[in-house]
Image (cartoon, rainbow, N blue to C red):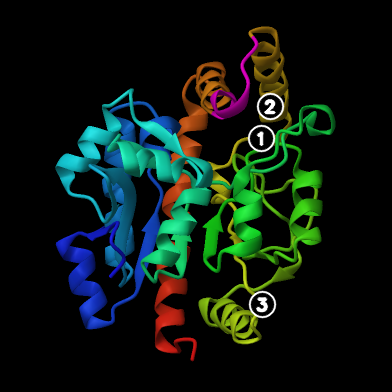
Amino acid sequence: MHQFLLFSPEVASARAAGKPVVALESTIISHGMPYPQNVQTAREVEQIIRDAGAVPATIAIIGGKICIGLSDEQLETLGNSPEAMKVSRRDLPYVLSTGKLGATTVAATMICAQLAGISVFVTGGIGGVHRGAETSFDISADLQELAQTSVAVVCAGVKSILDIGLTLEYLETHGVPVVTVGQPGFPAFFTRESGFNGDFQLDTPAEQAAFIHTKWQLGLKGGVVVSAPVPAHEAMPKEEIDAIIMQALNEAREQGVTGKKVTPFLLARIKQLTSGRSLATNIALVKNNARVGAELARALSEHPVS
């Protein structure tokens, strides 16, 4: 066992029994949603994964350890601690060595999941290339992590606050396959369609698992993006959310919001401008992703990579 890993009793038991485990990030709790919806959603998402026959492993950095699976008390602490650091690849050594409280991003969760031997990770949306990146060079570390860390990431596409076309180009350049579920179109988080298609449409967990196994058995390291659109009745109208996103982006620019602060600022402002409807969509898509991820984890565990 890795010296920095600390497994919860539930996850340790699942590992010993060979049950499928699904990793979950923790920035969605600390930075992605307001309290108390964040903690309530985290618990509901974990239960959805259990109900689908897998075991949830929410990941966070607590007391100098990478905690793989959190107690109710730890979830509550994360949801209520403004000082929790948003941890990506760059930040992991600092947060672990100093004993600070850290919530893992997509990139950091992928690293921790791979260390823990977990192949499937469920999130809301992955990071990507920010609008204006041709001058700011603001590109999420999530994309580089997908290029090198062998974990399947189930998401609702990328947040529509990003440049989706450039994000897909970056993934293609680095050989990261983008799989869509139930439709050829790549989703855009709040909406089911982004105007771009994924690389391969694979609708069933068995098809997705066969694809992922084949990739890794070929020695092709790196992740797979498995993108499932938010359920139609929970999606937001594209024209409406696009206009609101442009307003929020302009406000962020005017207020000098940059770096890690951009996404939390935009999500909070979009929630205000939609009178909370964007938060409801956010919660719905994460729950849907949890179901897709649990089914994929079960399919992968039935035929483990040799």
Q: Position of residue 82 (x, y in %)?
A: 33, 23
Q: Give the answer, above or below, for where 101 lies relative to 50.
A: above
Residues at marks 2 and 1 touching, judged by CB atoms closer than 8 Å: yes
| Residue 12 falls left or right of residue 210 | left
Work out which quarter of the rendered image holds the N terminus and state it. bottom left
Q: Amino acid at mark 3?
A: Leu
As drawn, the residue found furthest toward the right would be 134
Q: Which mark is residue 303?
A: none
Q: Residue furthest front?
A: 97
At x 26% / y 43%, what residue is drawn?
Answer: 62
Nearer the camera: disc 1 or disc 3? 3
Q: Earlier in the sequence, mark 1 or mark 3?
A: 3
The residue that mark 2 highlights is 240
Crowd class of label 1 (few under 14; some 14 to 19; many from 20; radius 10 Å): few
User: Identity of the amino acid at label 1?
Assistant: Pro
Q: Which residues are magenta?
A: 256-263
257 part of magenta stretch: yes
Would you name the residue on which mark 3 appears? Answer: 220
Residue 248's x, y, as percent?
Answer: 65, 18
Left or right position of 208 against 242? left
Viewer-proximal residue among 33 and 241: 33
Residue 171, compared with residue 300, is above or below; it is above
Which quarter of the picture shows residue 22?
bottom left
Q: Which x, y percent locates residue 147?
A: 66, 61
* Distance Cα–Cα, label 2 vs label 1: 5 Å
Q: Secondary structure at mark 3?
A: loop
SS type, badge 2: helix
Q: Is residue 115 above or below residue 253?
A: below
Pointer 1 and pointer 3: residues touching (CB < 8 Å)? no
Residue receiving disc 1: 237
Whether residue 22 is visible here, answered yes or no, is yes
Question: What is the three-letter code of the residue carrying label 2?
Answer: Glu
